[in-house]
Image: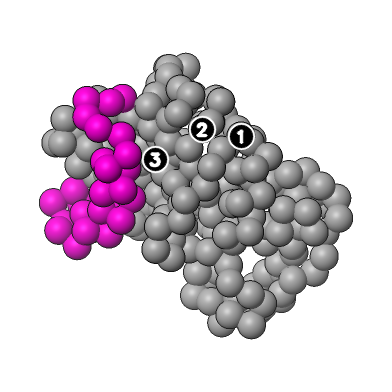
Amino acid sequence: MHCPLCRHDSIVFYHQDACRAYHQCNRCRLVFVPPQYRLSPEAEKAYYDLHRNDPSDAGYRNFLSRVFMPLCERVPAPAKGLDFGSGPGPTLSLMFGEAGYDMAIYDHHYATDTAVLRQRYDFITATEVVEHLFLPGETLATLLALLRPGGWLGLMTKMVIDQAAFSNWHYKQDPTHVCFFSRETFTWWARQSGCEATFVGNDVILLQKLR
């Protein structure tokens, strides 16, 4: 077994619940479920189809403002951005568009124009995305390559605290959540990838590409 983030093979058991086993990488500290627990593409999309993300929902916009506001402070309009994993009801891209930014969207299921993955961006957002990735190391490297030097990658995901908290954590109950990052994991990845990590609150991670 190899870590889906750093591909290291030093893996230890982390937790077991009624549905799945969880392991942790000794190098980057990512917690993940082995491949046999992944949903099929059809089952995964059916689960995503249950999401009701409404761009007119003030509560949802307020939720997304946790990454929207700090990025606006760091990247002034009119900058070019990509919302990666925009989902069935793209909203964050609309918020940036309303603020004067030039936005593109991509989603593996709902916005599949890969031409946007061949452009360069001043910032990229991925909200509630990285926990779904089967191979997060490959995806994060791809997104980083799309950023101009000095650009920002804004992520939103709940983070692992410790094993005791993990055992009762609601976040792991979602069957489409297969990778669980901690501050230690993001700090490790940033250092390896030539980025500087800034943590905003409990679930927003801003990564600036330094080279």
Sequence-earlier tag: 2 or 1: 1
Left-right relation of 159 to 12: left
Q: Tell me the residue at 35%/57% (across/down).
A: 50
Q: Which of marks 3 and 1 is nearer the N terminus?
A: 3
Amino acid at dot 2: Lys
**Which percent across, then down, holds residue 189?**
64, 45
Q: Amino acid type of disc 1?
A: Gly
Q: In what element is the residue under mark 2?
A: strand
Mark seen at residue 72: none
Observer-nearest of 57 and 99: 99
The answer to whether residue 210 of the structure is visible from this angle is yes
Residue highlighted by disc 3: 125
Q: Which amino acid does label 3 sit on?
A: Thr
107 horizontally vs 73: left or right: right
- Between circles 3 and 2, the one closer to the viewer is 2
Q: Answer above or below: position of 91 versus 166.
A: above
**Viewer can see residue 88:** no
Give the extent of the magenta segment.
Answer: 52-80
Residue at the spot of label 1: 194
